Image (cartoon, rainbow, N blue to C red):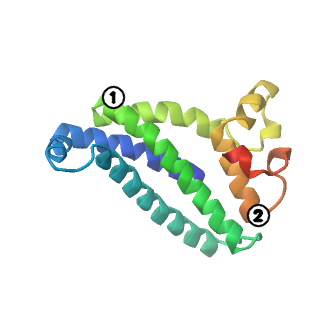
Amino acid sequence: MAQTALFGAIQTGVGLAEDLNKGVIDRLRNLPIARSAVLTGRTLADTVRNSLVIVLMGIVGYILGFRITEGPLKAIGAVRLVLLFAYSFSWISATIGLVLKDSETVQVAGFLWVFPLVFASAVFVPVSTMPEWLQVFTRNQPVTQVVSDVRHSTRGGIPNGREFVWHTVA
């Protein structure tokens, strides 16, 4: 869920760059709306899209045999955490989109900073199996924190050998 939401957050910048190139942003500037409405609307719309993708992933996961063992409240908290995570990263992507202004360049630039975070995280392999120098980075980066806490909220256990505390995610 976290990986998909993070990749989905890149689309915020791509969409803003396309809107800039097509003149949509210029037309919206002429309307009597707050200047922040365009960015806020774009990031919130992408969060809604991410929530639909996450629900679909949950349904497919259930069909394939994934079961939540920690109860519905923790599962809802996990989904909320992933959406907040994606919303936060969509603002980074929006900034990249506004600076670079070319949708293809924004997509490449988005993947440049997302790939190291995803592939040097606990998404695919346990942190303990990584080289020691990489474990330091992996344990202290946002993707690992979110993935570990979502796993804890849905399946239990102690994430990455550390005690689970919400202030770590915050």
User: Residue 135 at what x, y percent from top left?
Assistant: 77, 32
**Label located before the other in sequence (2 or 1):** 1
- Which disc number belongs to residue 38? none
Q: Residue at x 50, y 42 (%)?
A: 89
Q: CA distance from mark 2 to mark 1?
A: 40 Å
User: Residue 42 at what x, y percent from top left?
Assistant: 34, 50
Residue 154 in sight here: yes
Tag 2: residue type?
Arg
Residue behind mark 1: 99
User: Residue 147 at what x, y percent from top left?
Assistant: 67, 50
The N terminus - image quarter: bottom right
Residue behind mark 2: 155
**Front position in the image: 133 or 88:** 88
Residue 123 in sight here: no
Q: Residue at x 30, y 49 (%)?
A: 37
Q: Residue at x 25, y 41 (%)?
A: 18
SS at mark 1 in the image = helix
Q: Residue furthest top?
A: 133
Asked if residue 97 is positioned above or below residue 87 in the image, the reply reads: above
SS at mark 2 in the image = helix
Tag 1: residue type?
Val
User: Residue 61 at what x, y percent from top left?
Assistant: 61, 68
Q: Nearer the viewer, mark 2 or mark 1?
A: 1
Q: Residue at x 60, y 62 (%)?
A: 79
Q: Is residue 109 left or right of residue 62?
A: left
Res 144 quadrant in image: top right
